[in-house]
Image (cartoon, grey):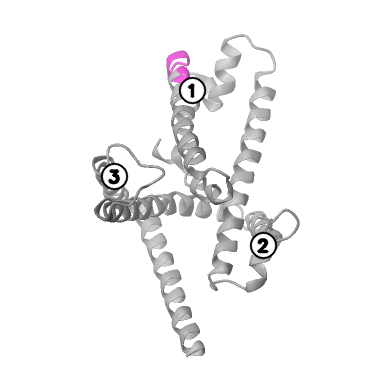
Amino acid sequence: MIFAFGGTEIVSVAAAETQNPAHSVGKAIRTVVWRILVFYIGSVFVIAAVLPSDSEGLKSPFAGVLDLAGIPGAGAAITLVAVVALLSALNANLYGASRMVFSLSERGEAPAFLSRLRGAQVPMAAVGVSVAFGFIATILELLFPDHVLPALLNLVGSTCLVVWGTALVSQFILRRRADREGTELPLRMKGFPFLTVFGLALLALIFVVGFSNAESAGQLIGTFLLIACIAAACRIGAKVKSARNA
């Protein structure tokens, strides 16, 4: 269930393009929690309460519940909902990916043309690169079925844990610094530092459970190695850039 929260960090990326980030981000975060409680946990509760454990409807649980309720066209309705959900996820991830590419370009860690803005201040080149990656991944999945997609899904899951851990550590350090210096923050998280420490402890527990399983341990180790390689490449690139400017 923890991975149901994956993608909520895109809210912080979108904050840079809103007129009132403090209000918009706070409102978005609060509504995300309720949406997950209703649409994820609530729907699973309904499925568990309605369908028996040996029901054939568990092969497609949402359609099974609708069929049991006597609603015609349940399969088509669920398919339509799934397509809309996938398009929504695609849109959100395309937005996040393109803005990350744009940010890397602005910091000199990606080609300069990726930070060019077109039209309504949209980084079209960064969007195009992000879309191209999606097409390449799709083609690779067609060429190597049941290999590329599972690898990407596993990478996303383990990367989410790393991103959340990094965000919590950063928030803990920066919030303490702001409180120490008396900096007025437009958006303050309640329950600090207890909720931050609780989140870190929860992530640590997930990592422990993950490393106890051979398959998930390999995924986590692979993610850490990939992050280490990226960090090393960024460090080397920064040194090369510094040497050129010297």
Label 3: how many residues lie within 10 Å, few (<14), some (14-19) or many (20+)? some
Q: CA distance from mark 2 to mark 3?
A: 35 Å
For residue 110, side relative to residue 32 (left or right): right
Residue type highlighted by circle 3: Thr
* Foreground pick, 171 / 111: 171
Q: Give the Cα separation between the discs numbered 1 and 2.
A: 36 Å
Mark nearer the viewer, 2 or 3: 3
Within 10 angstroms of label 2, few (less than 14), some, or many (20 or more) residues? some
Q: Which residues are magenta?
A: 46-53
Q: Would you name the residue on which mark 3 appears?
A: 196
The answer to which of 110 and 76 lies nearer the viewer is 110
Q: Which mark is residue 43?
A: 1
Give the residue displayed 47% in from the left and 28% down from the top.
40
Please tell me whether residue 240 is drawn above or below residue 140 in the rendered image. Answer: below
Disc on the earlier residue, 1 or 3: 1
Q: How many marks?
A: 3
Residue 59 occupies quadrant: top right
Mark 1 residue type: Ser
**Looking at the picture, how far across and down is residue 238, in whole percent?**
46, 79
Between 199 and 77, the one nearer to me in the picture: 199
Where residue 233 sits: x, y (%)?
Answer: 46, 75
Question: Which SS type dominates the magenta stretch?
Answer: helix
Question: Label 1: how many residues lie within 10 Å, few (<14), some (14-19) or many (20+)?
Answer: some
What is the residue that sits farthest to the right in this orientation? 119
Sequence-earlier tag: 2 or 3: 2
Residue at horizontal 36 percent and vertical 61 percent from the top: 221
Q: Report helix, strand or loop for mark 3.
A: helix
* Circle 2/circle 3 CB separation < 8 Å: no
- Pointer 2 residue: 129
Q: Which mark is residue 158?
A: none
- Residue at (58, 71) in percent of width and height: 110
